[in-house]
Image (cartoon, helix red, strand yellow):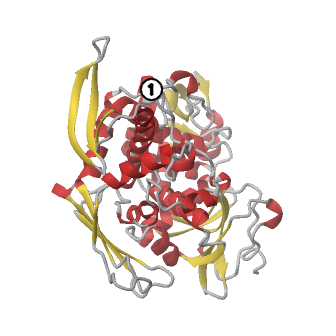
């Protein structure tokens, strides 16, 4: 039993304790949480715990200390740590902080299980590549912009540009409809989108990983049918295990777990139950058509089938009807002999996080990159929210965007804090300087990160009189934005 008397003497900490080792890669840890379907609440708690531990040299603290820092009860922290321990993301051991009675207590250590480092893992050995391919995970820097100019692309740019912004970003949101208006340069009216749900099951943004997986499966299936010159309809039976494996980027052997199956079914149901009403898509460029009101579904789930495979093992499949335009455009792309990664805009890498704003930012970044609509621009927080995630509240957007920046923070960044902001800074994590506009909600005031091929720089602008966020596509450290660091 390890003796941690020095923590008791130095800080007054008593067991139980939590440890976040310096070697722990938080980005990898959170990605693994997402792959193991850890709830957003648990992820939020463990993220707050990790941040609080940065103030302790040893990165070890007591439950009581953490409860005060992150404004939660000790029992609540224990509950979430036990959840993580069950999926091997916490390693516990008996220790003592009592030099007199040597009472036994527990140390909970954040840990990445051996063989489960998703950031570096290679699943190719566990997946039958002949049956399907994983969704392409090329980084945005490698995208060939020209190939997305084809008007017959099966995965309409409208889905990424418009529809995802009318999806729920808050898992707890009970609303049956979401209304957003998207401003576009050159248009008199903003584009109006309403997401409507049947029976209150409105699509939740991470559900899109299953849509990306379904499209990938469909491409490979149609490729085989086109070669055989078969008649191709609109309704297909998708085996759930390959779909889950592609959507969650996990080995096929793990996809049959009950939790994954239940999550997949619920996501497919929400996708199927959501209709998008789109108005004011047509502007002054059309002579005769003044407007078209579109009613769009990503697909319709018609049935869930339980069957036995050749070995007598019980399996599940989903019967899905895709829009005819989607099927026709895939057929055209396959006949033109385009490769899989040339046809996909949404890939699995974007959905490797449980941070809904990070997902929307990834899609936003890819859409801007392939259209060339933004080379460099500066946004206020609310301007960026309206562009990236208009369905989210400003406080939710700032908090989740800040978490994304923290996870990807540039370790070499050195902020020069403007006098107008100095009193707002309550904490420094890595190289990011944070304020706390609401208790328990930390927002980056100064920080730099690289995400989805963009250099993000957050800082105070005297010209705006507020914090602003700037972007550049140039990834070279020699051309980093110095807009804020030159301020005094």
Report which quarter residue 305 is drawn in.
Answer: top left
Looking at the picture, tell me which residue is in the foreground, 247 or 114: 247
Q: At x 40% / y 82%, what residue is drawn?
A: 286
Reply above or below: 12 against 274: above
Seen at 32% across and 38% down, the residue is: 231
- Residue at 38% x, 42% y is 214
What is the residue that sits farthest to the front in this orientation? 229
Quadrant in which the N terminus appears = top right
Q: Residue furthest top?
A: 311
Residue 23: image x %, image y %? Answer: 68, 38
- Mark 1 secondary-structure assignment: helix
Image height of 351 relative to 183, above or below: above
Residue 360 on image: x %, y %:
48, 60
Image location of residue 464, percent across then percent down:
61, 86
23 sits to left or right of 151: right
Q: Work out which quarter of the rendered image holds the C terminus and state it.
A: bottom right
Query: Residue at the location (60% across, 59% down)?
Result: 405
Is residue 82 visible in the rendered image? The answer is no
Which residue is denoted by mark 1 in the rendering? 252
Q: Looking at the image, can residue 377 be seen? A: yes
Query: Picture coordinates of residue 260 (x, y %)?
Result: 35, 34
């Amino acid at each position: 039993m390890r003796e941690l008397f020095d923590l008791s003497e130095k800080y007054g900490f008593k067991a139980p304790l939590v440890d976040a080792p310096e070697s722990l890669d938080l980005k990898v840890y959170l990605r693994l949480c997402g792959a193991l379907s850890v709830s957003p609440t648990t992820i939020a708690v463990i993220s707050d715990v990790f941040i609080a531990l940065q103030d302790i040299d040893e990165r070890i603290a007591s439950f009581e200390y953490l409860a005060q820092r992150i404004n939660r009860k000790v029992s609540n922290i224990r509950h979430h740590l036990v959840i993580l321990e069950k999926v091997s993301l916490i390693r516990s051991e008996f220790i003592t902080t009592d030099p007199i009675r040597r009472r036994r207590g527990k140390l909970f250590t954040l840990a990445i299980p051996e063989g489960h480092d998703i950031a570096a893992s290679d699943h190719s050995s566990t997946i039958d590549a002949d049956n399907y391919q994983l969704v392409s995970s090329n980084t945005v820097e490698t995208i060939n912009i020209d190939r997305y100019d084809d008007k017959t692309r099966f995965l309409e740019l409208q889905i990424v540009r418009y529809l995802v912004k009318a999806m729920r970003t808050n898992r707890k949101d009970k609303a049956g409809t979401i209304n957003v208006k998207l401003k576009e340069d050159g248009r008199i009216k903003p584009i109006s989108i309403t997401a409507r749900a049947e029976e209150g099951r409105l699509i939740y943004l991470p559900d899109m990983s299953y849509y990306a997986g379904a499209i990938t499966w469909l491409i490979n299936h149609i490729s085989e049918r086109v070669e055989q010159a078969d008649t191709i309809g609109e309704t297909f039976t998708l085996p759930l295990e390959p779909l889950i494996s592609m959507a969650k980027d996990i080995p096929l052997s793990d996809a049959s777990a009950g939790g994954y199956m239940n999550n997949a079914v619920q996501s497919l149901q929400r996708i199927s139950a959501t209709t998008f009403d789109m108005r004011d898509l047509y502007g002054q460029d059309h002579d005769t058509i003044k407007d078209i009101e579109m009613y769009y579904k990503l697909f319709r789930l018609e049935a869930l089938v339980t069957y036995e495979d050749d070995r007598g093992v019980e399996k599940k499949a989903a019967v899905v009807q895709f829009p005819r335009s989607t099927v026709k455009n895939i057929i055209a792309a396959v006949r033109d002999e385009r490769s899989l990664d040339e046809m996909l805009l949404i890939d699995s890498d974007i959905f490797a996080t449980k941070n809904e704003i990070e997902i929307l930012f990834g899609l936003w970044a890819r859409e801007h990159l392939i259209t060339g609509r933004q080379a460099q621009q500066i946004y206020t927080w609310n301007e960026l929210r309206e562009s990236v995630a208009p369905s989210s509240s400003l406080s939710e957007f700032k908090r989740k965007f800040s978490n994304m920046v923290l996870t990807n923070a540039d370790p070499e960044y050195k902020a020069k804090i403007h006098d107008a902001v100095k009193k707002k800074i309550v904490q420094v994590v890595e190289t990011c300087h944070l304020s706390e506009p609401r208790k328990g909600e930390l927002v980056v005031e100064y920080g730099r990160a690289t995400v989805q091929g963009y250099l993000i720089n957050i800082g105070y602008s005297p010209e705006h009189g507020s914090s602003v966020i700037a972007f550049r596509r140039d990834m070279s450290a020699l051309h980093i934005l110095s807009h804020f660091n030159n301020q005094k």
